[in-house]
Amino acid sequence: QSPLQGRLVAGSPMAELHIVGSLVGAKDFEESSLFCKWQLITDDGRPDNKRWMLLEGNASGQTQVDVNTNSEISVWATPLDIHYSTTTIHGWPKFACQVWSQDEHGRNILAGYGFCHIPTTPGEYDLRVCCWRPKPQSWLEYVSSFFLGTYPQLKNPDLIWRQDDRYRLNTVTTGTVQIKIALVTQGFEKHGVLASPSSEAY
C-alpha cells in the first residue's frame, strides 16, 4: 500500500484525489533568472459551482527565482502536495502557470504562459507544459519588446486555460515547464467512476 493512501480519509462519503510531487523547473526559455507563478484550477474556474473541496495543501503558489545565466535549464524543485475531496469528476483539476524573468533592476518580465490537464488515472507522471506568450501586434509593442524586453500580457489570466477563447490570440512558443507528480485516488468507484493505475510520461 502506498504511504499516500494512508493519508486519505477512511470511510469518507466523498471521493478523494491526492496530488503530490514537484514543480521541477523550466527549459528552453530565452530569458534567465526565471520564476513561476502556478495554480490548480477546479470546477472550471467557476466560483458559483463548487464541487471540489481543498482539504490540505496550497492550490497556488510561486517558486523562487533561479539565477542561472549559464544554462537553458532553470531548477525550482518546488514541492506540490494537494488533497481534494469531490463527488464528481466534472471540473477535474488543471495546472496553469505564468513564467517570469527578473532582470538586474528587479523588473519582472513575462516569459510565458502555460497549462495542462492533470491526468485522471492514478499513477506517476512526468508532465511537460508547453509555454507561449502573445506576439506584439502594434508598432509600439514591437519597439517595446526589442529595446526593453517587455511583451504583451493577458488582461484576463483565465485565457491561459480557457481554450475556447484562446484561439483568437496570436502567440509564439517560448519554452517548457516540467512537473513530476503522483496521483492517488480513493472512493471514485462508489460514484460510478473506475480508473486503472497508470505510470507514463505525458
Image (cartoon, grey):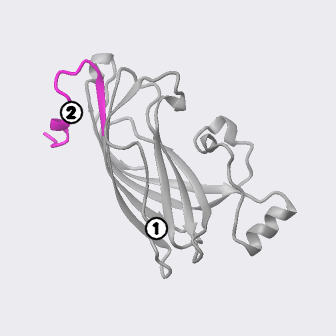
Pointer 1 residue: 65
User: For this rendering, which residue is in front, 106 or 177?
Assistant: 106
Q: Is residue 181 left or right of residue 61?
A: left
Q: Tell me where residue 98 appears, x and y as whole percent.
A: 55, 54
Pointer 2 residue: 8
The residue at the point 57 percent across, 71 percent down is 106
Q: Tell me where residue 16 appears, x and y as whole percent.
A: 29, 29
Disc 1 crowd rating (10 Å Cα; few below 14, some 14-19, many 20+) is some
The residue at the point 58 percent across, 53 percent down is 113
The numbered mark, 1 or 2, whose residue comes first in the sequence reads 2
Q: Is residue 44 above or below residue 155?
A: above
Q: Is residue 6 magenta?
A: yes
Q: Is residue 138 magenta?
A: no
Q: Residue furthest left?
A: 1
Q: Quadrant of residue 140?
A: bottom right
Q: Is residue 160 left or right of residue 149?
A: left
Q: Nearer the viewer, mark 1 or mark 2?
A: 1
Q: Tell me where residue 89 appears, x and y as whole percent.
A: 41, 25
User: What type is the residue that disc 1 sits on?
Assistant: Val
Task: Give me the C-alpha separation between circle 1 and circle 2.
Answer: 33 Å
Q: What element does badge 2 sit on?
A: loop
> Which stretch appears magenta?
1-18
Q: Quadrant of residue 22?
A: bottom left
Residue 52 - label: none
Q: Is residue 59 above or below residue 103?
A: above
The N terminus sits in image quarter: top left
User: For this rendering, which residue is in front, 97 or 178?
Assistant: 97
Q: Tell me where residue 148 appears, x and y as whole percent.
A: 72, 72
